């Protein structure tokens, strides 16, 4: 059999290219599916289970960082299993923990495939942006009731797009929105109208979700991004451009809000949602009071009280990622989650400003991750698919940097030997 394809290229090269294209398409489609979550298990889970399994069969390799991430997330899930063991009635807890385990594996998966090929960052961000644009457009249409059946894309008078909960829909749009802002601030001027238009659509979805957490997340991440760009560059001209483009982005946002406020009922709803403390936050039975009760309970139950049992006992869920870890995953799960967060924050910051091909993606993922940590003080997000992807994006960059430094160390002795050899020849 000939080893040369009809195109004249070696058959092995053609097959390798075909496999690479198929892998890229499958990865993009998997990331795209995370934008469509109405119930569990979502299409994202069903597709990614198969994708991870196939990738593992054909050579998914774990770097040192991916292995550490796997160990931390394994401890987190073991904590959940121990917590479940304390329950008399399991309800649907096994399925709940199975989803947690799967989502944990997606973090490891993304970290592993990124260290193998950093160009996959571009695939992930483009697929995520495409999903966000569709979700945002449908959410806006649902809020406006733009066509028959559009109401399916809104909940409680708020845009929800292709999500069951507006409070998940809004934060999902954050990374694509921050990425569009980054492109607006740094890309060639001829592309500004494109990125500005995409940013308006995504920001419109965030605004009409009427999620206070999403609003805060987007504002905080935007400020962190602009601040990081100022620190990263010493060029006065670049800093001036960032300042001008930031002002333009702010003007676009304010203009969009003013337009939205002209819609019937929007101004009143905005005033209601913009209040810092809602009726369900304060009071003896409010969200903040439950925090105190929960942390006291955690001191008495080192294994936790069982996943989702907090809501069954007190009528509302924890609405706090730290309390969630204690109640649902016990002290072991809480400790592993704290270490994971601290390692992600410290490790990501250490390499944040290094000039690498993947640095723009790391910067966007990192500031959005920090925003999610702040958001997690008032909402549960242990089953937010995109949060686990964010973790994988940051850990992938950490692993890439480790590989880059290893390569530099290996080249230095070789360069030194070559220099010594040339010096010896010159003396001779």
Image (tube, helix red, strand yellow):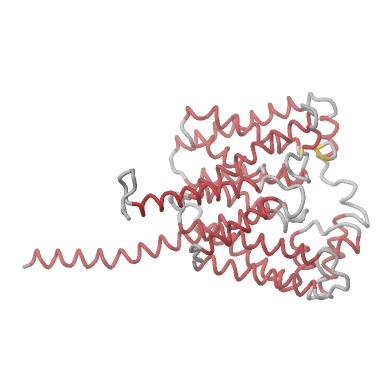
Q: Residue at 72%, 57% (x, y): give it.
A: 383
31 vs 200: above or below: below
Q: Name the side, left or right, on which 156 lies relative to 411.
A: right
Image quadrant holding the N terminus, namely: bottom left
Q: Residue at 85%, 56% (x, y): give it.
A: 288
Residue toward you, 242 or 149? 149
Q: Residue 270 appears in which quarter of the rendering?
A: top right
Q: Name the side, left or right, on which 260 lies relative to 109.
A: right
Q: Residue 193 appears in which quarter of the rendering?
A: top right
Residue toward you, 190 or 115? 115
Q: Residue furthest right?
A: 284
240 vs 311: above or below: above
Residue 15: % across, % down: 41, 52
| Number of marks present in the image shown | 0
Residue 28: % across, % down: 56, 47
Residue 41: % across, % down: 73, 55
Q: Residue furthest left?
A: 428
Residue 204: % across, % down: 70, 33
402 vs 233: above or below: below
Image quadrant holding the C terminus, namely: bottom left
Q: Name the side, left or right, on which 166 lies relative to 192.
A: right
């Amino acid at each position: 059999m000939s080893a040369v394809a009809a195109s004249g290229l070696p058959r092995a090269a053609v097959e390798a290219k075909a496999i690479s294209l198929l892998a890229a398409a499958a990865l993009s489609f998997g990331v795209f599916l995370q934008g469509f979550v109405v119930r569990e298990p979502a299409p994202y889970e069903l597709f990614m289970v198969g994708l991870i399994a196939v990738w593992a069969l054909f050579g998914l390799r774990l770097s040192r960082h991916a292995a550490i991430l796997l160990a931390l997330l394994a401890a987190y899930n073991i904590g959940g299993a121990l917590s479940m063991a304390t329950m008399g009635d399991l309800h649907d807890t096994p399925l709940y923990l199975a989803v947690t385990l799967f989502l944990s594996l997606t973090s490891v998966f993304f970290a592993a495939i990124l260290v193998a090929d950093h160009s996959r960052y571009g695939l992930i961000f483009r697929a995520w942006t495409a999903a966000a644009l569709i979700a945002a457009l449908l959410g806006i249409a649902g809020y406006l009731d733009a066509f028959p059946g559009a109401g399916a894309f809104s909940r409680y008078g708020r845009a929800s797009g292709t999500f069951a909960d507006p409070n998940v829909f809004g934060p999902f749009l954050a990374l694509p929105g921050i990425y569009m802002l980054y492109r607006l601030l740094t890309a060639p001027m001829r592309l500004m109208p494109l990125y500005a238009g995409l940013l308006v659509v995504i920001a419109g979805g965030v605004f009409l979700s009427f999620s206070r957490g999403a609003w805060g997340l987007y504002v905080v991440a935007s400020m962190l991004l602009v601040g990081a760009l100022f620190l990263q560059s010493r060029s006065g001209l670049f800093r001036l451009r960032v300042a001008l483009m930031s002002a333009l982005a702010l003007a676009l946002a304010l203009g969009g809000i003013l337009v939205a406020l002209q819609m019937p009922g929007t101004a009143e709803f905005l005033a209601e949602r913009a209040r810092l403390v809602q009726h369900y936050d304060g009071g003896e039975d409010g969200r903040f009071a439950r925090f105190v009760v929960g942390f006291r309970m955690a001191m008495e139950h080192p294994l936790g009280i069982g996943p989702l049992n907090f809501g069954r006992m007190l009528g509302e869920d924890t609405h706090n990622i730290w309390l969630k870890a204690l109640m649902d995953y016990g002290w072991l799960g809480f400790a592993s989650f704290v270490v994971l967060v601290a390692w992600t924050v410290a490790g990501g910051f250490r390499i944040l400003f290094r000039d690498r091909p993947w640095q723009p993606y790391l910067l966007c993922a990192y500031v959005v991750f920090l925003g999610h940590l702040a958001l997690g003080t008032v909402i549960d997000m242990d089953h937010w698919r995109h949060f686990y992807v964010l973790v994988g994006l940051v850990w992938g960059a950490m692993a890439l940097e480790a590989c880059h430094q290893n390569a530099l160390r290996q080249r230095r002795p070789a360069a030194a030997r070559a220099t010594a050899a040339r010096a010896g020849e010159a003396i001779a």
